[in-house]
Image (cartoon, rainbow, N blue to C red):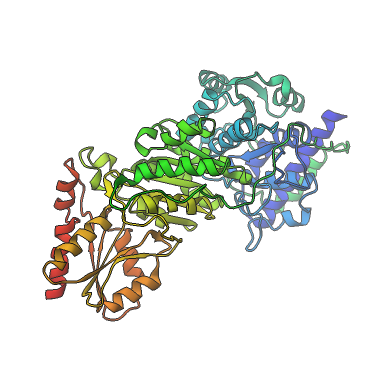
Amino acid sequence: MRTQALRDAANRLRVRSVRATCASNSGHPTSCCSAAEIVSVLFLEVMHYRPDRPGDPSSDRFVLSKGHAAPLLYAVWAEVGFLKDEELLELRKMGSRLEGHPTPKLPFVDVATGSLGQGLGAACGMAYTGKHFDRASYQVYCLIGDGEASEGSVWEAMAFASFYGLDNLVAIFDVNRLGQSEPAPLQHQVEVFRKRCEAFGWTTHVVDGHDVDELSRTLGPSGRVKGRPTAIVAKTFKGRGIKGVEDAEGWHGKPIPRDRAEEVVRDIEGLIRGAPAPTPPSPVAPLAPPAGGDPVRMPGPPSYTLGDKMATRKAYGQALAKLGRGDPRVVALDGDTKNSTFSDLFRKEHPERFIECFIAEQNLVSVAVGCATRDRTVPFASTFAAFLSRGYDQIRMAAISQSNVNLVGSHCGVSIGEDGPSQMALEDIAMFRAIPSCTIFYPSDAVSTEKAVELAANTKGICFIRTSRPETAVIYKNDECFKVGLAKTVRQSPKDKALVIGAGITLHEAIAAAELLAAEGIAVRVLDVFTVKPLDVESIVAAARAVGGRVITVEDHYPQGGLGEAVCGALSAELGVRVSCLAVKGVAWSGTPAQLMSAFQIDAAAIAKQVRAVLND
């Protein structure tokens, strides 16, 4: 009876997937059909969760890495009663929450998927959180397509899970042989999949992915080994149950033609015997603690001395360790750069809340996103800002996932000096400005860095904190108030003739330039943006008007997409304003920070020269 009930449920999932994709005249029914038994066994027998409370913190997690099989996910939530069958027919339609690929608009979706190869990394973050932070019984299951197994990010995640012994994580490879435009590289060579998974340290089972009994045995506790993650390599057939389509090329991403759909549905329904559907098991102890809803607060104010020098990257490490003292939800991740980003200061003080992700930046971002799901933690992930470009698709998907993840990039700009251009982040502001839900902090001293860390912990959406390598003077008092989107005027007078806008290292160059010009009798106003996004448009416009429309921006970044372009956008409606943008124009090379900032005309001398030119124009 149990076996037939699971088979019946799998076929109902197929019927729902076919009908939904026919109604939308788009979608991937064949990809749904290959995994129907896998999902039936998981949701109706193996997973412990509450169908009426999808976001329950103690429930098992499911990540559909092969996000194009979204109709199958929606179908199973209709099977357990959370969705109505009528809503499935709204798939992919304007205004429907049932989008083409899963997003957290639905309470049972923790992370958006569809950009392939990313689900397992997020699942690793969830599993690590469950095992080490929540210390709860919930398990994490990730369904992966065989085609996406070509993505290197999958194997970054495989290595991470094995290294940390995530025995609460199960990865299921749906080996249905066919990709989008041709067969997948390994087709049905399931033994090659087995060897690869075993080589990465996973307990691995090869199964018939359409045999519900075999799936039950391997997905359940009997298929696990303590201290090791589990991989299920399931041999399946794309389009299973659809005559003339099963295991046939050319059907990826195509709904069944409407003149054939009812015949297909009748054939599949003919296999359903009417066995009662099983009731999903509930979560078991130990349960996860409830998510904390209070703001994250520092245990005390900053304690720096005006004029003292400290690199903002070090101030970040000190601030994060301090924030960790104030709230146990704060966790830190790094990509084997912790002694340079100074996240090592957090590790030394809170080793149980630090995750070393090694040199795998795509996985670093995905694990952080996974840690942030269901508000279990407040994660800060750091590496050199240049290396975050490797994880940009993961960052893009984190925005779609509505993730509250904090990313910190150090070693930005030519001011890092001798390491050379491969280590210099000169595109990162542009990268993060393009992310819809992103707040960009660019602190200029130790006090503003500490404030940025605390603000980021309490800001919804993705936050990026850009830190610098050179030591810079503390210019703000410890009781200075900072807010997202609020700039700071660090130098002004009624006689100001021009406005210089900087951030980070270039703010200090702007202050030095203002002092040079003051000796010549030229007064200039200096503005620290603090957040590049959102930009304090009101303050910038007011300051530009006050100086007669003469504005100079200076940044340790390429011109494209950087601070200068942001300021130009803010002033675009202002008549009589001229903006001069000083930025790094070209690929850099090795040299001292002073030599490079001079060569690329973003130092104090270049700023002063530009101000003179603007005044003489």
Residue 39 is situated, as x and y percent measured from the top left of the image, at 71, 36
- Say if residue 116 shows up in the picture: no
Residue 346 is situated, as x and y percent measured from the top left of the image, at 46, 36
- Say if residue 601 shows up in the picture: yes
Nearer the observer, 135 or 219: 135
Above or below, comparing residue 577 to residue 348 in the picture: below
Residue 183 is situated, as x and y percent measured from the top left of the image, at 52, 34
Nearer the observer, 238 or 483: 483
Above or below, comparing residue 105 to residue 73 in the picture: below
In the image, farthest residue toward the bottom: 575
Q: In this image, 521 relative to 153: left or right?
A: left
Q: Residue visible at 85% across and 38% down?
A: 277
Which quadrant is home to the C terminus? bottom left
Q: Residue visible at 49% across and 29% down?
A: 155
Which quadrant is home to the N terminus? top right
Q: Residue visible at 73% across and 25% down?
A: 220
Q: In this image, 538 relative to 132: left or right?
A: left
Residue 545 image-quadrant placement: bottom left
Nearer the observer, 83 or 209: 83
Nearer the observer, 564 or 528: 528
Q: Residue visible at 16% across and 41% down?
A: 591
